Amino acid sequence: MTQYKGILFDKDGTLLDFMATWMPGINKAASWVAGGDIALTERMLIAAGYDPDQDIISSGSLLAAGNTAEIAECWSALLDGQAPADLVPRMDAIFRQQGAENGVPVTDLATLFHTLKQRDIKLGIATSDSQQGAEHSLAPFGILDDLDFICGYDSGHGTKPGPGMVNAFCRHTGLRQEEVIVIGDNLHDIEMGRSAGAGLTVGVLTGTSNREQLAEDADYVLSNVAQIFDILDGSLQARIE
């Protein structure tokens, strides 16, 4: 049985409840870009993946799995003469502030990360948020000192679903890709792990994807990231909870 020595976590929808944590920031950023125009704000949200009828973010959409630059490009297409690059700094600032103020963890993150650290497992974060935004949103939960690695879309390691973030984690920790577990709530996360040759890919149901969507490619699908110990201890069969 492979001994897994590192875990690379997605952040939003994996460690933090996606809708509770991010809808306030998404709404505020969209309203700012739209200049307070309510109808335009709604059009922008829908274009990027919000389903107002079900009040959900669609799995795999820009809001679920994209980064700020990609969302800005989508929204700028609905504006007259607004360059996406001009929107990104302020959008990142809104996301950073709102993420820190509204973060809702899916489990006791401090206990989760401290326990994993006691097992000598290298721990990292790979997010489509900015790196600074990730640090701000996770700081209240007391896990930053347990992290060996953290990167965002702006850290220079590429973006999901490419392999760059996983490869950077491996370079930083000295681990081989097959020794790493990648955990996320979207197929972008699973595809990132697959493209890098990660030892295991794990989907979680605390984000924007359902079991059927994640089971298309993930080795395991868990209700909550806290169940990772069941995988590490060998008590779960692949592709079931």
Image (cartoon, rainbow, N blue to C red):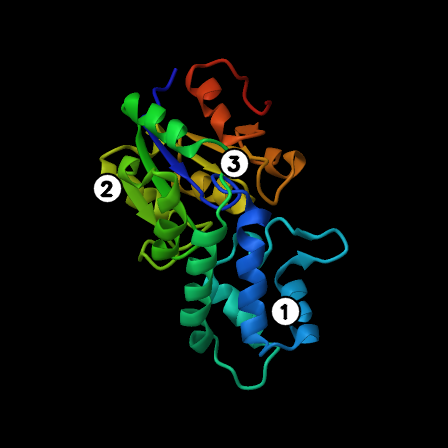
Q: Name the residue under label 2.
A: 172
| Mark sitting earlier along the chain (3/2) | 3
The tag earlier along the polypeptide, 1 or 2, is: 1
Q: Which of marks 1 and 2 is in front?
A: 1
> Which element is circle 3 on?
loop
Q: Which of 51 and 93 is in front in this view?
A: 93
Amino acid tagged 1? Met
What residue is at 73 percent from the left and 58 percent from the top? 52
* In the foreground, 115 or 209: 115
Which of the numbered marks, if any, corresponds to residue 106? Answer: 3
- Left or right, 53 with reference to 75: right
Which-is-in-front pick, marks 3 and 1? 3
Q: Residues within 10 Å of mark 3 (few under 14, many from 20)?
A: some
Tell which circle, 3 or 1, labels the residue nearer the N-terminal end: 1
Q: Residue 44 carries which label?
A: 1
Residue 239: image location, x then y, percent: 58, 25
| Residue at 56% over, 61% down | 26
For the residue marked with disc 3, what is the amino acid?
Val
